[in-house]
Image (cartoon, grey):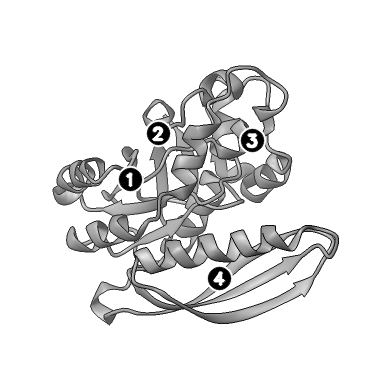
Amino acid sequence: MGGTPVLGLNVCMFPAAAPVEKLNLILKGASESAQKEGVIIAGGHTTKNDELHYGLSVYGTVKPVDLRLSSNAKPGDHIILTKGLGTGILFAAKDRAEGVNWQSAIDSMKQTSVIASKILTEFGCRCSTDITGFGFVPHLLEVLEESRVAAKINPESLPLLPGVIDFSRSFACPVLSTNMELAGAKFDSGKHDPKWINICFDAQTSGGFIAFVSEENAGKCLEKLIDAGYQAADVGEVAEGESKITLV
């Protein structure tokens, strides 16, 4: 949303039977990653649980003029993704297929969006959201509904992690059908190959941003994101009309 993180608190649920050394590594890795971005981890909370869950409650600062709100998408804005899609598909294929480039997914998930956020602010972006477990389309649709606009997406322009196209035909994340239900009739895949439906609703871990940038600034913004090391792409455009996503 255009903010700068300052302080973080650990929130961790950890299996009682798991080696405590793994918990140490998780907390150490999070702390080191935060410190690289100038964020202090000031403590937090842990509790026992059957499954592992870890996250951060983060406090930050932002200038009101730099706030990026879900209600600020405008007709004519270009839609830019800052990271490649496909972590859910690759995870599903990881132990069941040969040739999965899992390291590419790890590298993408480890890449923070701090620099990307600063670049978007630099080019006047006033609307963005992140892509997480609901997938690309549901997160995009949330913005469209808040802004009361539509979107036309070119699936061939979507940035994808290596191998995602091939594996998308045979593997899907466990929540694919649930994510598809979130969009329902507000998503029109046209006559495109069903693989794009899988990709558009694939659950992402540490996904990038969906950013809405003016036509005037979109090209330069995209160029700077790529120069900064992001697998970014201009994937479509905001249009007037009922809140709906159409693959063109």
The answer to whether the residues at label 2 and label 3 have Cβ atoms under 8 Å apart is no
Answer with mark 1 or mark 2, whichever residue precedes in sequence. Answer: 1
Answer with mark 4 or mark 2, whichever residue precedes in sequence. Answer: 4
Q: What is the tally of numbered marks visible in this picture?
A: 4
Note whether 59 is above or below 206 in the view shown. Answer: below
Q: Which mark is residue 91?
A: 3
Q: Is residue 71 left or right of residue 99?
A: left
Helix, strand or loop for disc 3: helix
- Residue highlighted by disc 1: 80
Amino acid, disc 1: Ile
Mark 4 surroundings within 10 Å by alpha-carbon count, few (fewer than 14), some (14 through 19), many (20 or more): some
**What x and y, as percent, mark residue 44?**
60, 80
Distance between the Cα atoms at labels 3 and 1?
Answer: 24 Å
Helix, strand or loop for disc 1: strand
Q: Residue furthest front?
A: 21
Answer with mark 3 or mark 1, whichever residue precedes in sequence. Answer: 1
Confirm whether residue 111 shows in the render: yes
Asked which quadrant contains residue 107, the reply is top left
Distance between the Cα atoms at labels 1 and 2?
Answer: 10 Å
Answer with mark 2 or mark 3, whichever residue precedes in sequence. Answer: 3
Amino acid, disc 4: Leu
Answer with mark 4 or mark 1, whichever residue precedes in sequence. Answer: 4
Asked which quadrant contains residue 248, the reply is top left
Q: Which mark is residue 216?
A: none
- Residue highlighted by disc 4: 56
Distance between the Cα atoms at labels 2 and 3?
Answer: 17 Å
Mark 4 vs mark 2: in front: 4
**What x and y, as percent, mark residue 38?**
34, 71
Mark 1 vs mark 2: in front: 2
Helix, strand or loop for disc 4: strand
